[in-house]
Image (cartoon, rainbow, N blue to C red):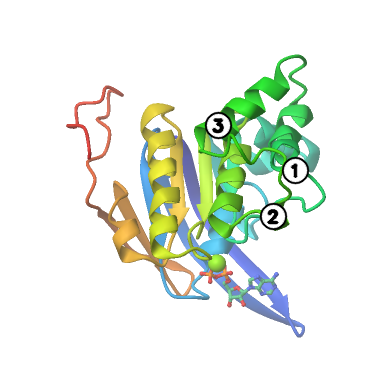
Amino acid sequence: MMIVAQGLEKTYTSGGRPLPVLRDIDLEVAPESFVAVVGPSGSGKTTLLGLLAGLDVPSAGRVVLDGQDLFALTEDERAGFRAERVGFVFQTFHLLPTLTALENVLVPLELRGGGRGLRSRATELLDHVGLGDRMHHYPAQLSGGEQQRVALARAFANQPRILFADEPTGNLDQETGAAIVAMLEELNREARTTLVMVTHDQALAERAHRIVRLAGGCIVADEEAGAPAPSADGTDSAAPRP
Ligand SMILES: Nc1ncnc2c1ncn2[C@@H]1O[C@H](COP(=O)(O)OP(=O)(O)O)[C@@H](O)[C@H]1O
Ligand SMILES: [Mg+2]
């Protein structure tokens, strides 16, 4: 399994009172799969993604990501693990405003310390998302869809084993959003990156292999979706999708 979450709980404290936002979460995600997480606003989707990615610490339970028990690590070790194996795409892009597109993509590459060839790798990634002619633009000079493409290039810079995306199309028009999801699908299919995406959009969720539905902090449904899942032995038995 690429992700195993067991007995995951998250309780915040609000005005001195405990506020449970996630309860009894057990979840397994197979390598190379594409899982959509859906549910009403406030149901705990962002909280769940943050825990699965090791951005946040649970109140109880554990997460094993790509064989690593995340919360057995120190915070520093967890950050290092994330830099190597985990990508994250946010609804609001989260680009650094004082850096150009190219410099934003260089950040994770430099953090990991790849040495030579980082600039050409960053350039290649931006070319791949269709921004070859926008490398030196600052985020404020880019459209929302372009900013999200930079964020995708950045999230994918270190070829993560797993990519989390929290409503990556939430701030985009439908057509632009569909193009972003098409790029995520391509990463999932071609680079075999496990993809977990929160979305409000039922049509986009149907493009996943599986849909996990949250309500009130619990998983209330877990079903196969429109797209065929990769076969268990890792070979791609499914017919190519359009
Ligand atoms: N840092 C926090 N402190 C207190 N409550 C929080 C915090 N973050 C989220 N919550 C609460 O947890 C619940 C789930 O939030 P969230 O995971 O963001 O839901 P979703 O992404 O499904 O809209 C909400 O009721 C929210 O108000
Ligand atoms: Mg959210």
Q: Residue furthest front?
A: 133
Query: Is there CB contact under 8 Å for labels 3 and 1?
Result: no
Q: Which corner quadrant holds the N terminus?
A: top left
Pick whichever of labels 2 and 1 is earlier in the sequence.
1
Tell me the kind of residue under disc 2. Gln
Residue 229 image position (x, y, % from top left):
26, 39
Residue 177 image position (x, y, % from top left):
43, 57
Write the residue at 43% across / 75% down.
Answer: 40
Question: Label 1: how many residues lie within 10 Å, few (<14), some (14-19) or many (20+)?
Answer: many
Position of 216 compared to 90: left or right?
left
Q: Which corner quadrant holds the C terminus?
A: top left
Residue 108 image position (x, y, % from top left):
72, 34
Residue 46 image position (x, y, % from top left):
56, 62
Q: CA distance from mark 3 to mark 1?
A: 15 Å
Write the residue at 67% across / 78% down.
Answer: 18
Q: Which numbered marker is on residue 100?
A: 1
Write the residue at 44% across / 37% down.
Answer: 194
User: Residue 234 or 151: which is nearer the viewer?
Assistant: 151
Tell me the kind of residue under disc 1. Thr
Q: Secondary structure at mark 2?
A: helix
Q: Quadrant of residue 105?
A: top right
Q: Residue furthest right?
A: 98
Q: CA distance from mark 2 to mark 3?
A: 17 Å
Q: Quadrant of ligand 2?
A: bottom right
Question: Label 2: how many residues lie within 10 Å, few (<14), some (14-19) or many (20+)?
Answer: some
Q: Which numbered marker is on residue 141?
A: 2
Q: Secondary structure at mark 3?
A: helix
Write the residue at 64% across / 28% down.
Answer: 123
Query: Is residue 61 shown to the viewer in this render?
Result: no
Reading the image, the residue beneath label 3 is: 127
